[in-house]
Amino acid sequence: MIDKVTDPHASLQTRRAIAGLQALDELPGILADCIGSLDGPPARLAAIIERSACLSAGLIRQAIGEGIDLIQSGYSIRQILERMGQQRIERWILSIRAFRPAIKASNVPSRADLLLHSLAVAHSARRLAEACHDGPSPDLTYLTGLLHDIGKLATQQVMPRAFVAICQQAQQLGQPLYLAEKDQLDTDHAVLGRLLAIQWSLPQVMAEAIWLHHSPHAQVCQDPLLARLIVVSDILVGSMGLGRSGSFDDVELTDQMARWLDLDLDLLHAVCRHIGQIWPQLEEAMAGQDTRWDALSELTRSRACRLASVSERLSEQQRQADANAGQLRLIKELVGAVADAHGPLALAARCAGIWQHHYQTARTCLVLAPLRVSDPVQIAIIGDLGGCAEQLVEDRAAAQLVREYASRPFTAYLADELLEQLQDWLDDQWAPGRTYWVPLALENVGIGLLIFEVNYPIDPDRFADQVESSAGIISRLVSLATTCQYHQQLAERLAAIRSDGPRQMASSRPDIYQALAEVASGLAHEMNNPLAVISGRAQLLAETASDEQVQKACQQIHQQAQELAALLEGLMAYAEPPQPHRHKVTVDQILEEALALTRQKLASQTLDIVLDGPGKELLLEVDSAQLASALANTIVNAFQSYQDQPGQVRIRIQRQADALSICVIDQGMGMDAQTCAKATLPFFSARPAGRQTGLGLAFAERLISINGGQLRISSQPGQGTTVEIELPLALQDRS
């Protein structure tokens, strides 16, 4: 005879033990099947999980914790898996422990026995729910039936000795297990199951059905029919004597049980027959699952190796992301240096300092290759403590050497072969074996050398990979600054040419054109390709950069490069315009085309223009496009003389013997004699700096002159300006 436990604290101690349980341990074979199915379709993994109360309880807990609505998922294991995502599922599966029995005793149900009983109850509950009118969801009923004995599974796991004693008492006395539990623990697995369901935040209807699955008459729950379905299903499976659940009482189906569900008893027997038919399959699926430790070990090892590989790859990606973020910060600083530096040497010093700080190098210097070998080599030196010095080396051999080294393939070179030259240039010694250099080039054109000392060993190839993007940015910025400086020098040369005055300009105009052609050719050679690269790369960087300041700086670089290119194009067109394609054309046709161009240039269709005089039908033998462009430039200049105020421009046409005179007359601000004498000089403009390029009238005079004509200007301050264009008539219109 088994004595009843008299410890008044048994129930409290049991509840505390169960409350500390975070998950139900799974059979090693089922766990191995889950791990092996992680890479397969969700339906395959769902079929494994929905056969196990341990896995199903864990999945529902995970889903609720991640905010997945079970009602929207229809209580479907497959839909829950699809909403969770692969990584979360994998993390959850790999966190489950395998069940290893602490005690083995005969006539005591094993873990597999309990899971098999729960699975049979779940199948029975689904069949009965499908037969009930307005009953609960079959999937909800199936899961509730599968989980109805989680309290029993928890007791077996947490209190194995007590579980054995309870089962032995139930066998000796022919009792249902829950009565023996009350004798031994002063509670039962239905109460403990409800405790776990509440602790794991399972749906309330499930928790109540688990709690009441031995109380068919209970009405204190949200869904009494769900609870009665689980009660009847548990009795139905028990009445068939299938498997071992720990209960040893004799039960049978009755009409009363059928009435609980508002069903016929025959239907209950039909469900019994169905369970009997699928029972062999359920047993076969569960057979041997408690002994497949080798399979679990191998799958776990394989998965661990794979996860280690993934972790290593993710770590490398994180390192690369951190490196890229650092590069973006560096690029932002380098681009920001443009606003603070005036001239290529000052910019080189700023870039070298930023580069030194970012890569933690010691002494660093940036050697600039001159655009011409006759120019000096410019060097910016940043000391160990950040102090800056500048040096100019006027040596053709040095310039040639820097150009040659800067054009080499990009990598980090040991600078031992450069140390002697570096000492001559800087009158200072650099450490052999610790001094390196990287070439700075743009489209295979050498820009300079970045030379640096290091206080730590480096892998040249790996270091080159790290610094290549920043070196490219420095190359582009320094190239742009050098080109701008060169352009400034050319502008100064042109200003010197203009300052010689109109008398010398008129007497030596062919020489001036030749000089301008040489300047334009030099600009084209030195600037066209770098400008195209700088403009394109700046535009690309502006489109991809996430920082607004970097975007703005790149857009400014792109805009300035475009303006330089346009200026270069205008200068070349002035110095070497295309030879005119002469053909006979009426004055009226030229005027019509010129006025259309004027409206386009001024972005206005309503201009106050007065045409005066006969002769529009006279013929000229000129390049009509060139002459229309020249006349349009002259008319635009006349309108601009009103300084953004409305005004009238009069065009007077007169025949003078064998020539035609076209006068463009305005009543604008006018010019004094000195300004009037310089009006046709290239890059001269009486308007504020930054408004115009100063090529309008100069370009007009150039085009008129190559078409055999002349341009004369007369003007008085405050009384307006008259620009006279004289052109020879075609032969048949001459007198």
Image (tube, rainbow, N blue to C red):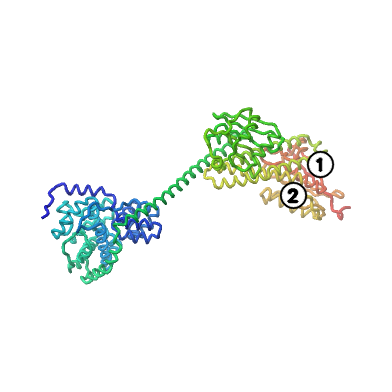
| Residue appearing at x 25%, y 63% in the figure | 121
Q: Amino acid at mark 2?
A: Ser
Query: Is there any visible trace of residue 724 in the rendered image?
Result: yes
Q: Which mark is nearer the camera, 2 or 1?
A: 1
Question: Percent position (x, y) of residue 643?
Answer: 68, 41
Place residue 367 in its image quadrant: top right
Q: Pick the residue in front: 226 or 43.
A: 43
Q: Is residue 250 left or right of residue 63?
A: left
Place residue 286 in its image quadrant: bottom left
What secondary structure is found at the residue carrying circle 2? helix
Q: Pick the residue in front: 615 or 122.
A: 122
Q: Pick the residue in front: 460 or 319.
A: 460
Distance from Cα at disc 2 to Cα at disc 1: 22 Å
Vertical side of 108 occupied by 564: above or below: above
Question: Percent position (x, y) of residue 392?
Answer: 66, 31
Quadrant for the N terminus in the image: bottom left
Label pair 2/1, CB-CB below 8 angstroms: no
Q: Residues within 10 Å of mark 2 (few under 14, many from 20)?
A: many
- Residue hosting label 1: 510
- Residue hosting label 2: 629
Vertical side of 466 occupied by 196: above or below: below
Q: Is residue 412 left or right of residue 82?
A: right
